[in-house]
Image (cartoon, helix red, strand yellow):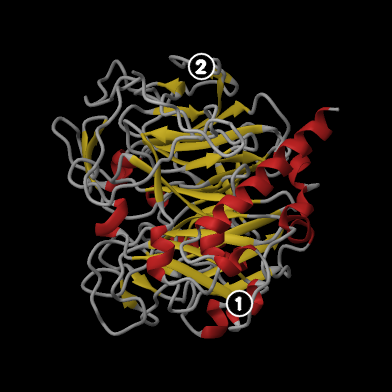
Amino acid sequence: GQEDAPTSTNGQEDAPTITGTTMDPPACPARPAPFCTEPLTEETTPDPANPIAPGTLVQGTNGPNAGEMTLEHEAWSTPESRFDYTWPSPEDREAAIANGTFVDYNINIAGIKGYNGRWFMTTPRWKGGVPATVVEYLPKGSDVEGASPDKDLFKPWPSWHWNRYSDGTPEDCNSTIQYTHAALVDIKGRLWVIDNGAADLFVDTGRYVCPPKVMAFDIAECDANPDTCEPVVHYVLPQECARFGGTNTPVTGGGPIQFLNDLAVDPVTDWIYITDANFPTPPNDGLPGSEYTGGVIGLNVELGICNRVSSMETDIVQEAPTGSQFIVNGANIALSQSADGIALDPISDDVVFTSIGAYSTWTMPAAALRDPTLTNDERAAAISRVMVKDDQTDGFTVDPQGNLWMGGMQSSSVRKYVRDEWGYFDPNPEIVFSDCSLGVWFDSFGDDIGGNKIVSASNEITLFFCELFPGAGIPCPPAPDRTFAFRIFSAPITGGTSMDTIMAKADTWTEGWPDYAALAAGEDGIGLASDTTSGSSTHTSFKILAFTGMLALIFMHLH
């Protein structure tokens, strides 16, 4: 009388199929961590005068890794002591204050990546007066070269020259970084950045200055020659991948909008995957792509291929109003960007992504973003819901063992989702960290190259942007009077080897790949993608190849 278990042709039980529905949001699972719905009080608010000591273990609630997360650094921006930069001279600093290109209370962080004991960060030009958008963090009192004993500093990276505000000419745009939300360091020692080309994005003076582009810098080369180093990868995205309406196009008031939010890089093949967290309902102004409101991009600079899946706002990703309206420490949040955090799964060769305004996590075969012969609808058909979670998420990553790490924004937590027997993510996470007074908003996760650990940064963006996120009982003083902090956390990657050990041997993974350049040129590509319309056959074949390769490489490493 029991339902028969599904079986395959080899006698083994088939894994269950997870598919995504396109309209109705799913029911949320039980909440494993308390939600931070109330504002912090005087008793629960951390004290800037007594920062938490570096290396302090912080609390978790369940799972084998609970309590194994370390607070590496806590940095405060207060009216008495703001974040600052390593200026060429005191005169340069004073000139920047005078001309408005340095407003210290407008500085906050978003992305973080670790590399051999160093911290690379992004300081987005959310508001005016942000003199550099890609930086190396020099914690106060640390033994890092250039660090101050009493002030947290940002060192513009690779140089002041690259981080200057652009005048919008093509020549100047090619040699500046205007607005970077996320950066990434790969195992080859390259720092990747996506530049939206914007300035002052969330204020009335916000404008697009330069076309969006992707760049990668060789860290060793730029450390040795910061004033002359050039990117080893430099690619301006075409209009069909990321829209640009021209220099000084306003961000608000009906201008075309794109928001390249996060990226993942395959260091073996240099395929790059990017989320465009575009805002809803851009104008249909005749530019290519004016009909869409966000998406996921796959590009390969060497091959000159840039593919995109778009128009996901109403079809797949958004689960408004249940997902896009929520509370963080008493602040009311309403965000409806489409695709936000993104990661490349090293086990399955899937691109995994999520939206802030959704309870679902989505996946699609990376091959669907590599194949230039697929239409947008065919790529969209390859997207499926891989997991339903109980909380909203901004940044996340997949570690070398295939575990999914993400922040819980309402619960101020860090979650680790392990794989079940079928290779799917278990929807019941380990709560590695949970503290309503310390997490607040985890904007970025990543593998610390050389450190065999996951790193993440939380920022108190609800305090930094209190005028955008009002809440009952939450004071919102003028910007010069606000106090906020960011915190760097880390957790060990357990149960296996590090990303650089695995990927150094992974050049055999691409055996059997089609000739994507030939496909882009309209020729027959011999290989996996030549016989697919939805990406599913490519997905299955590559999943077998990648999974087998990963197991073999781990086995070799352990023996």
State the residue lying farthest toward the left. Answer: 472
- Residue 451 in percent (x, y) is at 70, 34
Residue at disc 1, secondary structure: helix
Is 100 on the left or on the right of 477, as rendered? right
Query: Can residue 198 be seen?
Result: yes
Q: Is residue 274 above or below residue 372?
A: above
- Above or below 173: residue 252: above
The residue closer to the viewer here, 388 or 45, is 388
Label 1 with label 2: CB-CB less than 8 Å: no
Residue 109, horizontal then vertical, whole percent = 46, 46
Within the image, what quadrant is residue 551 found in? top right
Q: Quadrant of residue 158?
A: bottom right
Q: Which residue is mark 1?
A: 519
Relative height, residue 49 to residue 233 (above, below): above
Residue placed most toward the observer, 223 or 492:
492
Figure check: 56 above or below 397? above
Task: Tell me where residue 259 appears, x and y as whole percent.
Answer: 39, 63
Nearer the camera: disc 1 or disc 2: 1
How many discs mark residues in the rendered view? 2
Q: Secondary structure at mark 2?
A: loop
Q: What amino acid is labelled 1 in the image?
A: Leu
* Amino acid type, label 2: Ala
Q: Position of residue 493 (x, y in %)?
A: 64, 28
Can you identify the residue that label 2 sits on?
A: 66
